[in-house]
Image: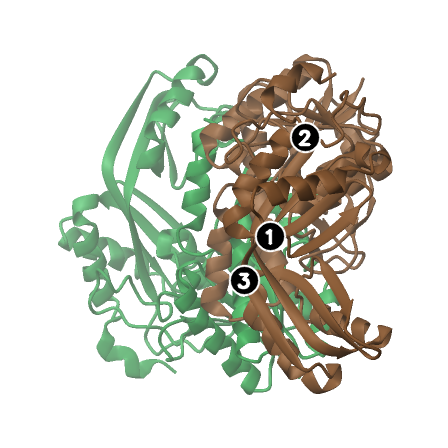
Chain colours: A brown, B green
Amino acid sequence: MGIIVQKFGGTSVATTERIQNVRNRVMEEVQNGKQVVVVVSAMGKTTDHLVSLAKELSTNPSKREMDMLLTTGEQVTISLLSMALQEAGQPAVSLTGWQAGIQTEKVFSNARIIDIQTDRIQKLLESNQVVIVAGFQGVSEDGEITTLGRGGSDTTAVALAAALGAERCDIYTDVTGVFTSDPRFVKEARKLESISYDEMLELAHLGAGVLHPRAVEFAKNYQMPLEVRSSMEPERGTRLEEEVQLEKGLVVRGVAFEGDVTRITLFGLPKSQAKLSKVFSRLAENHINIDIIIQALTGESKSNLSFSIMDQDIEHTLSVLEQFKDEFEYDKVESETGLAKVSIVGSGMVSNPGVAAKMFEVLEAADATIKMVSTSEIKVSAVIEQEKMLSSARALHEAFDLQEKSASLVK
Amino acid sequence: MGIIVQKFGGTSVATTERIQNVRNRVMEEVQNGKQVVVVVSAMGKTTDHLVSLAKELSTNPSKREMDMLLTTGEQVTISLLSMALQEAGQPAVSLTGWQAGIQTEKVFSNARIIDIQTDRIQKLLESNQVVIVAGFQGVSEDGEITTLGRGGSDTTAVALAAALGAERCDIYTDVTGVFTSDPRFVKEARKLESISYDEMLELAHLGAGVLHPRAVEFAKNYQMPLEVRSSMEPERGTRLEEEVQLEKGLVVRGVAFEGDVTRITLFGLPKSQAKLSKVFSRLAENHINIDIIIQALTGESKSNLSFSIMDQDIEHTLSVLEQFKDEFEYDKVESETGLAKVSIVGSGMVSNPGVAAKMFEVLEAADATIKMVSTSEIKVSAVIEQEKMLSSARALHEAFDLQEKSASLVK
């Protein structure tokens, strides 16, 4: 009998009514003859509420105690879903992370799963129980409760699916699948039937936000078929799998974008590899996420270094740069806010050298100024003015034929 | 270095402000040079909120899942208190029941502690950390989360104190100690400096409500000195210990009372030990708590059986009696509500045969009708009309010299 792992996020379990809806989704798979493992997140605003309690008591609560606190959220959901299933006559058992055998590194707030002991789950599945596992959490070797960080429940679900040799892992969310672009802003965006792990990885990193990158990596490593679908709508979602038949002529499969980007430039930095890595280590030590990096030589021994960060990190970044000014030896620093990043993604790009050039033409036609560029084998990103972000995204979506009318091309 | 176990109930940790107050109590003991283990309950109304969520999903949620749900309450409190201590510069670590090594039977909602593996706590205490343990919860041998039932956090605290060889276990609550009677209703009631385990046990069973009987039993078995005191007021509370110097002339040490008592009478029950035990096994199977039992013979082969229950159990009790009418073979059943139980407690009673007689005189003088009586070596209880409960309790309090002016007699 095949095993299906289903994952429901916080919005899908926000109220007891929605938990009853989730129960129906679970029972459908049981009626399909599947053994079902369900992974759930904390109910809606629970985590926010817990975080606000913590802030009332501590300006900088320890990560260990935050993990202790936040893991209660999923524990509430698993027991409630189990009750809902039992009430409907479906045998079910809830398990916390440690009960489900989810072993992690001893790293609080952002642990990685190192092993899953599946015997307890296997035994329960064999006795025809639906097994409900708390997402986002695990236990270290010495019995400390840990959490997996943002998007952790996705990772729990995919890791469990891999460890159990599941047929498929279904990620239920509040959208109906993965779209060619964000349908809230790009009206022509359409749902993809399937997408490759690598493409999804780029989209996830680019802020498409449907699936956490770590979960996608996990799925890719274990070649676990995923499906992203809606917990509210019955329609099929988007399959993630290795071998995706390329849609004819569709080199680009998605347009992603995000605003609130700032470009920082250090002028007159000594031209040395050591100096460069020093800058980025110091920023990393201070938990500042850097995205695109560009270095321009300005002479024999000097260079200008630009990199992009999120707006919210500006003050912190500038204070770190100021703090280490003597160490870095730059002449001056400048920052430019009000920027955005627009990206195109598609595995077909690697064999289509003209894609980047076409993107730049489209951006130029859309009157956007390209401030920075970054490319990988399957994506091209450009930093432009934020006020041009949506019009540029729409123009790219149209130029690369992603609009609704091509939907028939989807295999 | 001596170990002190402190226990704070739900009212004492109901808000983050109160948790800060608890933090101060903990730090005082640390400043006294003690190693401190703190046991806490769920914050104020948390449990009620969780129960109401469960009821939205299930008419009769499984006990296993209720334990899974409710144990999150204490887990929230331990992490918050730990954060509060850390914020004040005091190293602290929170532990759930299973992390603290609290092993119980596999009985959901009402498990008994069978062992406590203290090595983890010991190691943390030796590294000068305050250890905060979730009350009310434990883990069975096969890794199931269990709860200890009502008053479970008291039991956790006393059991931990015993297992750790603590100097003392302080139970912080919303009253300042154990009183000669309930000070809300008997103005003359005064706080006892000390009381024996047995006396406390009777008072606890009689609804004095300060300490759970199971915790008192545990303390008695391990001869663990307890102190019941207020989490808000600095004054000393009431010590529980084996050897209590009897206050001169004070044979009776407390007057307890509770209302909402119902008397059930089965008329014409066959006079047989087997029949009697059958009745009470059936009621026990149906989780109906019986208090006082009286059997009156009415002939060679018949008897009338009366017993007292709480008002809230009337309907359930009558339906069980109706269900097994053929098995029990009684003629008819009657119930009388609107009753109350008034009790006097004191270890000195056993050597003072006139105490019960004096109690009946006082009740008679107070115009109360004695419906049922029950005695032990250290208490006498009488069921009377509820409308006479408070006046009777006050009369008993005065007749046995428990009033405030005798406070100087307390050693």
Given the image, on which type of amino acid does mark 1 rest? Thr
Kind of element beneath mark 2 = loop
Which badge, 2 or 3, comes first in the chain's sequence? 3
Would residue A68 be found to the left or right of residue B337 on screen?
right
Q: CA distance from mark 2 to mark 1?
A: 20 Å
Q: From this view, report whether residue A190 is shown above or below residue B127.
A: above
Residue B255, quarter of the rendered image: bottom left
B157, B99: nearer the viewer: B99
x, y percent for residue B20:
44, 72
| Discs 1 and 3 carry the same chain letter | yes
**Residue at x-position 44% and y-position 12%:** B326
Q: From this view, report whether residue A240 is shown above or below residue B301.
A: below
Q: Chain of mark 3?
A: A
Q: Which residue is mark 1?
A: A369
Q: From this view, report whether residue A325 is shown above or below residue B227.
A: below
Kind of element beneath mark 1 = loop
Given the image, on which type of amino acid does mark 3 rest? Thr
Q: Chain of mark 2?
A: A
**Residue at x-position 60% and y-position 82%:** B34
Residue A297 visible in the displayed image: yes
Label 3 near label 2: C-beta < 8 Å? no
Label 2 Cα neighbours within 10 Å, binned few <14 / some 14-19 / many ≥20:
many
Given the image, on which type of amino acid does mark 2 rest? Phe
Q: Which residue is mark 2?
A: A400
Q: CA distance from mark 1 to mark 3?
A: 14 Å
Residue B157, quarter of the rendered image: bottom right
- In this rendering, which labeled residue sits more in front, label 2 or label 3? 2
